[in-house]
Image (tube, grey):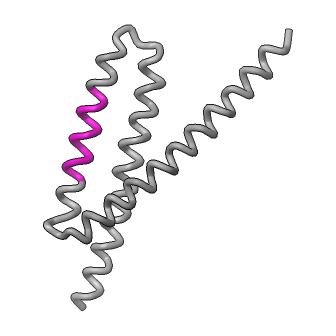
Amino acid sequence: MNNINETIYMALAFTTGLALGTLFFGGLWLTVKKALTAKIPALWFVGSFLIRVSITVAGFYYVAAGSLQRLMLAICGFIIARFIITKAAKKHEDKQLILKKGNSNEY
């Protein structure tokens, strides 16, 4: 029974790492988009950074619960989320660029 519980905790640690990574890097992407049109972009960057880092550090602290294995799984999920968000953001930006080019050719 104890082995099953530990397996569940490991899966939850990885999933939590994915969620934290999505929040962190998705939040960064949204911050950059918002800051481009903001009157005070530094406020967006600093505020977003503090919020994202606070949530991420607290999430890692609680998911690890003193277990190095859980912490490593959460970090793996976090890194995988980085690649997923980066790819999704690039795909979104490419689509926006194509739409802008398509609209600029029409008169």
Q: Say left or right for 88 vs 102.
A: left
Q: Is residue 71 magenta?
A: no
Q: Residue furthest left?
A: 66
In the depicted structure, whether residue 105 falls above or below residue 25: above
In the depicted structure, whether residue 98 falls above or below residue 70: above
In the depicted structure, whether residue 25 falls above or below residue 70: above
Q: Tell me which residue sits at (85%, 14%) in the image.
A: 106
Q: Tell me which residue sits at (23%, 32%) in the image.
A: 50
Indicate the position of residue 70 as horizontal and vertical percent values.
26, 68
Q: Residue furthest bottom?
A: 1
Q: Tell me which residue sits at (23%, 62%) in the image.
A: 63
Indicate the position of residue 23 as horizontal and vertical percent values.
37, 44
Q: Tell me which residue sits at (31%, 16%) in the image.
A: 42
Q: In the rendered image, which quarter is residue 28 located in?
A: top left
Q: Is residue 52 magenta?
A: yes
Instruction: Find the magenta span and give its range.
Output: 47-59
Indicate the position of residue 97 as horizontal and vertical percent values.
69, 26
The quarter in which the N terminus is drawn is bottom left
Q: Say left or right for 4 vs 87.
A: left
The number of discs equals: 0
The quarter in which the C terminus is drawn is top right
Q: In the rendered image, which quarter is residue 94 located in?
A: top right
